[in-house]
């Protein structure tokens, strides 16, 4: 709108990755609780578009936009086994997880926050997608300590989101420092539940419940 003050502050970090398994068989959007993964390093959402031209009389008659597949790649200090079990639909027997030809990852929804130095956040919601098995990497220890990050990638698609006329793949909103209005609305749109004041936090060794202190 004319005269409205615009925000030109760039994001400087990423925080608070949440995910939930979608449940298409009931009135709820997700099955179970929203889970939280800590120590996010990078999240990249690629949404390619291509301009397609139609020609006639030796000139451009029309231009249309072709939308490509939405892909997501995330890097973590550590992606815990418990998160991989859920995101990838792994079979677990007596504490042992497995990969195999019959793996069938569930549809999930995700939300993460892009953070700014002034305390404001841009919340990004991914409506429906699946994650694929990551590469297993290991490296010998050398004179200096090197931390090997975990990565995972997925493909996302459109889903009906309450309030929007057309199906959406990505929904996002911005909150000023100390504000949570758009965050709270986004959690209801993507997960169908409120932003958790306590979260199921997936760590590298166990799954615990902790109090969320961030606004």
Image (cartoon, rainbow, N blue to C red):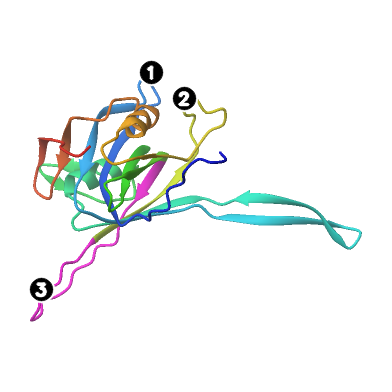
What's the residue at 66%, 50% (across, down)? 65
Residue occupied by mark 1: 27
The reply to whether discs 2 and 3 touch (Cβ–Cβ < 8 Å) is no
- Relative horizontal placement of residue 44, taking residue 209 as reference (left or right): right
What's the residue at 10%, 44% (across, down)? 95
Residue occupied by mark 2: 162
Residue occupied by mark 3: 145
Q: Quadrant of residue 165?
A: top right
For marks 1 and 2, the one nearer the N-term is 1
- Relative horizontal placement of residue 78, taking residue 170 as reference (left or right): left
Foreground disc of the pair 1, 3: 3
Foreground disc of the pair 1, 2: 2
- Relative horizontal placement of residue 3, taking residue 177 as reference (left or right): right
What's the residue at 29%, 43% (across, down)? 87
Report if residue 148 lies within the magenta region.
Answer: yes
In this rendering, does residue 103 appear at all?
A: no
Magenta-colored segment: predominant secondary structure = loop
Distance between the alpha carbons at the discs numbered 1 and 2:
13 Å
Looking at this view, name the residue that lies furthest to the right: 57
Looking at this view, name the residue that lies furthest to the bottom: 143
Distance between the alpha carbons at the discs numbered 1 and 3:
49 Å
Give the number of callouts.
3
Where residue 51 sits: x, y (%)?
Answer: 67, 56
Residue 197 badge: none
Q: Is residue 136 above or below residue 2?
A: below
**Disc 1, SS:** loop
């Amino acid at each position: 709108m004319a005269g409205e003050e615009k925000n030109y502050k760039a994001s400087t970090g990423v925080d608070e990755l949440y995910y939930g398994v979608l449940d298409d068989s009931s009135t709820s959007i997700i099955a179970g609780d929203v889970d939280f993964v800590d120590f996010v390093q990078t999240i990249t959402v690629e949404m390619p578009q291509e301009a397609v031209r139609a020609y006639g009389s030796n000139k451009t008659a029309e231009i249309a936009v072709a939308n490509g597949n939405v892909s997501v790649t995330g890097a973590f200090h550590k992606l815990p086994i418990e998160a991989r079990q859920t995101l990838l639909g792994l079979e677990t027997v007596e504490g042992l997880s497995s990969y195999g030809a019959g793996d069938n990852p569930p549809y999930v929804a995700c939300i993460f926050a892009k953070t700014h130095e002034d305390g404001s956040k841009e919340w990004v919601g991914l409506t429906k997608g699946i994650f694929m098995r990551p590469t297993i990497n290991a490296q010998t220890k050398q004179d200096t300590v090197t931390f090997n990050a975990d990565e995972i990638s997925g493909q996302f698609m459109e889903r009906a989101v309450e309030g929007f006329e057309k199906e959406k793949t990505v929904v996002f909103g911005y909150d000023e420092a100390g504000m949570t209005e758009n965050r709270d609305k986004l959690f209801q749109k993507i997960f169908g539940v409120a932003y958790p004041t306590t979260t199921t936090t997936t760590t590298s060794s166990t799954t615990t419940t902790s109090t969320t202190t961030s606004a």
